[in-house]
Amino acid sequence: MGSQRKLIDQLAPLNYSLKLRLRKGCTFFGPGVAQLLNLVEETQSLNTAAQTMGMAYSKAWNIIKVAEEALGYPLLVRTIGGVNGGGSMVTDEGKKVVRQFLKFQEEAYEMADILFKKYF
């Protein structure tokens, strides 16, 4: 199996991997958080968004709390119960940080592609 691994590696084209995250002491925002917020925007439910991603509600809730603490503003407005049940809506600030992160990611990948082609 080891020699087969070397053969596969030798035949594979050279490529790179780039992982972008926002940090403030610890990592608090990346593509997964952006996807979670986009799903909340679609479904108006953190629980449904978490289920769609195969994630426990408690984990999704913790991810949002950590990001909100790091950013210093709420990402979601939550409503509890009531006639129509509870739900969540992404705040304007939350929508903005998702847009900014996705644009940053897009431009960083474009620049990384240019640099990769330049050097390899």
Image (tube, rainbow, N blue to C red):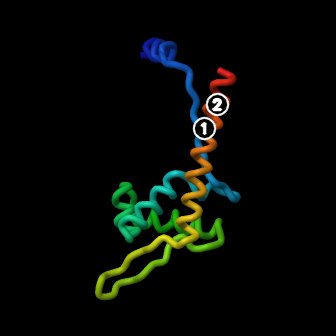
Q: Relative to residue 46, is residue 19 drawn left or right?
A: right
**Snapshot quadrant of residue 120:** top right
Relative vertical location of residue 41 with respect to residue 107 in this rendering, above or below: below
Please give the name of the residue rendered at 55% of the width and 52% of the height, measured from the top-left corner: 102
At mark 1, the secondary structure is helix
Question: Which residue is under mark 1?
Answer: 110
Give how far across and how far down residue 103 sits, in percent.
58, 51
Q: Does the CB distance between marks 1 and 2 fall below 8 Å?
A: yes
Separation of disc 1 and disc 2 at Cα? 6 Å
Give how far across and how far down residue 60 sits, in percent.
45, 63
Q: Relative to residue 27, is residue 58 drawn left or right?
A: left
**Snapshot quadrant of residue 112:** top right
Please name the amino acid that badge 1 sits on.
Glu
Disc sitting over residue 95 in the figure: none
Give how far across and how far down residue 111 sits, in percent.
65, 37
| Label 2 crowd bin: few (<14), some (14–19), many (20+), radius 10 Å | few
Judging depth in this view, the residue of 95 and 30 nearest the camera is: 95
Please give the name of the residue rendered at 52% of the width and 19% of the height, measured from the top-left corner: 13
Q: Relative to residue 22, is residue 63 drawn left or right?
A: left
Please name the amino acid that badge 2 sits on.
Ile
| Label 1 crowd bin: few (<14), some (14–19), many (20+), radius 10 Å | few
Relative vertical location of residue 71 with respect to residue 30 in this rendering, above or below: below
Question: Which residue is under mark 2?
Answer: 114
Farthest residue toward the bottom? Answer: 83
